[in-house]
Amino acid sequence: MTRAGSAAARRRSILPGFGITLGVTVTYLSVLVLIPLAALFFKTATLSWAEFLAAVAGPRALASYRLSFGAALAAAAVNAVFGLVVAWVLVRYEFPGRRFVDALVDLPFALPTAVAGITLTSVLAKNGWLGRWLEPHGVFIAYTPLGVVVALVFIGLPFVVRTLQPVLQDLERELEEAAATLGASRLQTFRRVLLPALRPALVTGFALAFARGVGEYGSVVFISGNMPMKTEIAPLLIVTKLEQWDYAGATAIAVVLLVASFALLLAINALQRWSRVEPAA
Amino acid sequence: MGEATAISTPVSADATRRGVSESAPVRWALTAVALLFLALFLALPLVAVFSHALADGLGVYWAAITEPDALSAVRLTVLVAAISVPLNTAFGVAAAWAIAKFDFPGKSTLVTLIDLPFAVSPVVSGLIFVLLFGAQGLLGPWLQAHDVKIIFAVPGIVLATSFITFPFVARELIPLMEEQGVEEEEAALSLGASGWQTFRRVTLPNIRYGILFGVVLLNARAMGEFGAVSVVSGHIRGVTNTMPLHVEILYNEYQGAAAFSVASLLALLAIATLAAKSALEWRIGRTGGAR
Amino acid sequence: MLSLRKRPGFAAALVALTWLGAGIARADVTLLNVSYDPTRELYEAYDALFAKHWQETKGEAVTIHQSHGGSGKQARAVIDGLEADVVTLALSGDVQQLADKANLIPRGWQDRLPNRSCPYTSTIVFLVRKGNPKGIKDWADLTRPGVAVITPNPKTSGGARWNYLAAWGYALRENGGSEEKAREFVRSVYANAPVLDTGARGATTTFVERGLGDVLITWENEAFLAETLGKGELEIVVPSISILAEPPVALVDAVARKHGTTELATAYLEYLYAPEAQELIAENHYRPSDPNVAAKYASKFPRIELLQIDRDFGGWREAQAKHFVDGGIFDQISVSK
């Protein structure tokens, strides 16, 4: 049945339970999510504008946004590129153990962030498995912004791959065959036929990985150096302010992060709607 | 996230000739790049957890996971999951029913609001409960007067974890139930079934794998949450430390092998989660989400 | 009819719930000691000693729970509602906050126990790699380019604040009391720090386990502990001047009253001054306050010229306000790096 038909059927639905399920939904949502989030804004409201701006736009806070957003952006970009390769390989090619590798892609979703954090740190620190090879060459990963990027690449990896896979599967081969018949090289076909078709999913995956990376704490706080102005992520700054009884300051920064992530969330939802509405390549 | 991945048709030399696939060297190169990337970022950390855990021998490993504080941490982690998983699942089913089977104004706003916890940093998720229930918080004085402990006690951890994992099941079920439409339920109703009967015998079997799928992810996240719990727990050993927090404590006490030993339990949980997820995806893919 | 045999799922759930519930129910008397970061091993040993003592003298079994973390962070937790019966923090300024911000202890708390409520003291020393390859001898070496210094964050860690003040005190003395020079000196030290952990133990872990840094500025007790665990790869270097670090202990009256543990908690703190406890303290590398025990272990602890917080820095209130609050000197030098 078409979506329009389903929608029409729903409008004149005779199904029971609307009242109670909507009621439960809205109540639970309000109590668990909306009211606690409102506490955030209440607390921020106790600040004057000057205090709010000082907390939110002070040099240390700005440095932490630069790191959190910058590293998340870089990591999402890396994931966009490699995620595309991984998704392509998993969908289009056969090789032994493919099912296993496919399942493994979800590891960052399933593994606790703290475990990821301490593991990545020990592997990349000076005496770690990888660290000891990289350090003599002057490549320092642990305790630098690069380390933050590495941790966020791990965290965001599944987002791009999982968003691309269904789209890749649904792509119609006829288009590629047509392009080939018309004389396009494989690379041209990829650039002009496939990439545009994949773009909405790619952008969505990128945005999801980015949004996740900005607020990430557990996997980053071990590998980052936590130096103010240099390697302090925004969530850590919130925790630090909290530990100094600067509730208002912590809350102010939390509000900034929240508003930014919420804006991203809206953008992602819009992207997903846009990519669903577009006719399948 | 959560999309089923069915097996696609393999590529052949014939396809290369027809121009719909890359040449073999390119294929090899791409595969190598992909596998190397995954090996570096996924396989290596996973192997490292177990390797570091067993670095000091099986004796240390066993001692680390059977030590009283570790067992308390396991118990607390399981308890928190045992509460937040059913709660969020029940909510998810109710929300999906309301959203997928009916049309009403503000529906898309509701869906966006349900996604909200995904947009919140874990630290902020913990912070909001401290602001609400901490001794200096909005409800603090009332709670103190009635001797109700939420922050720095188990209820606070349950709340923070439930907040973080709130959307998981709902997000799985909403698209699934939307796709399934209302025809089957309406048919059942017209045949004389009551609302509950319709739900139990028509809807539930259809969404059963979707629910399981959401539950598996929810559980993994609930047991593994760190940032939010770190803010609301009091880090009281043996009382308010979940497994991830216990791992952090051990890590900070020169007990690297012990930390990784407890971490390996969480890694095993992760592997079980991946296996369950794969199996369910296969089931859903095979049956198109229906029974 | 509800038969457990016929409903294995239900029976299993009952068993599981009982197991879970056993973890929550607390039958015997308990005490919560909220402490600072490096004291984990000390209190693990002391709690066992005290429990035995209490059992023998009162015939009652007591369970003592511990929470550890950066001193400032722990103080905030207690103010936020963490129900500590006693606090054993890194500096009196943090304990004072419990009185000032939350009325949990009376004003005159520090004089209730001997030695200004400090059953043990410590100081600040350096820990370096075996053979001291960078030749670290004194505070001035910490500002040399190419020397990586590990020290925690003064905003969260008590030990970090002692570190900072010791460095400041050294610079003041070397530069004839010039605050400008002291500020510049401390700035250079922190410029050499690649990472700031939240607690003293975190910094030690970074230095020892992760192999980061050339020198660790830390509590003397922590340095001793790390040295024994460092398997010969670490050495202690004692600077020319340091600070008398006085971590106090205190009963949290409001909480103990509520729990009915005032007598127990008071005994817990007073027992820290008993000879056998003081011996335990010395064995765990803290300087005991009891002069007899201190004399016995005199050879273990080096004699250093020690600055004092009250005499040389105007007390914690002044030091905190000048250096560590938002916008204080530490913030200023962080930003100007």
Image (cartoon, coloured by chain):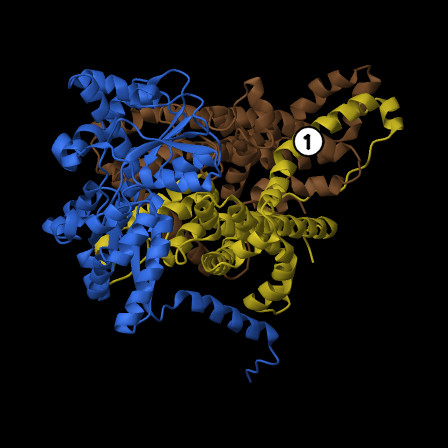
Chain colours: A brown, B yellow, C blue
Would residue A106 appear left or right of C213 to someone viewing this image? Answer: right
Q: Report if residue C15 is visible in the image.
A: yes
Image: C334 above or below B203:
above
Instruction: Please tell me which residue lies in front, B215 or B175.
Output: B215
- What percent of the width, then of the height, locates residue B83? 46, 60
Numbered marks: total: 1
Q: Residue sitting at 53 percent across and 51 percent down?
A: B262
How many other residues sit within 10 Å of disc 1, few (<14), some (14-19) or many (≥20)? many
Pick out the residue farthest to the bottom. Answer: C1
Q: Among all residues in the image, which is located at the extreme left?
A: C108
Residue B140 horizontal/vertical position (percent)? 24, 53
Pinpoint residue C119: horizontal percent, then vertical percent: 22, 50
For the question of whether residue B121 can be seen, the reply is no
User: Residue at (61%, 69%) from the top-left corner?
Assistant: B192
Where B263 falls versus C329 (above or below)? below
Q: Nearer the viewer, residue B184 or B64?
A: B64
Q: Give the quadrant of residue B20.
A: top right
**Which residue is rendered at x = 52% and y = 43% of the image?**
A115
Chain letter belonging to callout 1:
A
Residue B123: % across, % down:
39, 41
Image quadrant holding the C terminus of chain A, namely: top right
Q: Relative to B189, is C171 above or below? A: above
Which residue occupies 57% across, 72% down? C12
Q: With C325 as the anchor, is A32 left or right in this view?
A: right
Callout 1: SS: helix
Amino acid beneath label 1: Val
Horizontal relation, residue C222 to residue B167: left or right: left
Instruction: Decide which of C311, C265 is in the foreground and name it.
Output: C311
Q: Which residue is mark 1?
A: A86
Q: Nearer the viewer, residue A56 or A205?
A: A56
